[in-house]
Amino acid sequence: MENIRSIVVGIVSLAVAALFVVVMATVGLAVIGFAAVATAIALGVAWMRGSLRVQKTQRQGGPRVWNDGRGTIIDM
């Protein structure tokens, strides 16, 4: 009788532990999914606002040369 009780308690304990692992894995995946969606939305908003667009500079004729009082600056 004592052996049967030990076996039943062991099986129930394993079942509770397995259920705990499944619940924690599900919660972890839900948190990861929420973080991924939040990141995608933030990137979309930043893209729509234009802060992620590459600013293109227009080159003028040749190198710019000027003197700031401490020396000549040549901007290639």
Image (cartoon, grey):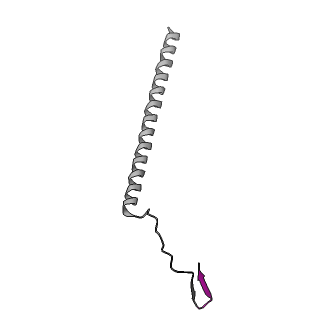
When the figure is inspected, residue 2 is found, relative to residue 38, above or below; the finding is above
Place of residue 43 in the rendered image (x, y in percent of width and height, measured from the top left):
41, 55
Of residue 23 and residue 70, the one placed in the foreground of this image is 70
User: Which quadrant, please, contains the C terminus?
Assistant: bottom right
Magenta stretch bounds: 69-76
Is residue 60 magenta-colored?
no
Looking at this view, name the residue that lies furthest to the bottom: 69
Of residue 15 and residue 38, the one placed in the foreground of this image is 38
Is residue 75 magenta-colored?
yes
- Number of disc labels: 0
Of residue 44 and residue 25, the one placed in the foreground of this image is 44
Looking at this view, name the residue that lies furthest to the front: 61
When the figure is inspected, residue 4 is found, relative to residue 50, above or below; the finding is above
Q: Residue at x 46, y 65 (%)?
A: 54
Place of residue 45 in the rendered image (x, y in percent of width and height, measured from the top left):
37, 58
When the figure is inspected, residue 11 is found, relative to residue 66, above or below; the finding is above
Q: Residue at x 49, y 18 (%)?
A: 11
When the figure is inspected, residue 28 is found, relative to residue 71, above or below; the finding is above
Q: Residue at x 49, y 13 (%)?
A: 5
Looking at this view, name the residue that lies furthest to the top: 1
Place of residue 73 in the rendered image (x, y in percent of width and height, measured from the top left):
60, 84
Q: Residue at x 47, y 26 (%)?
A: 18
Place of residue 53 in the rendered image (x, y in percent of width and height, measured from the top left):
43, 63
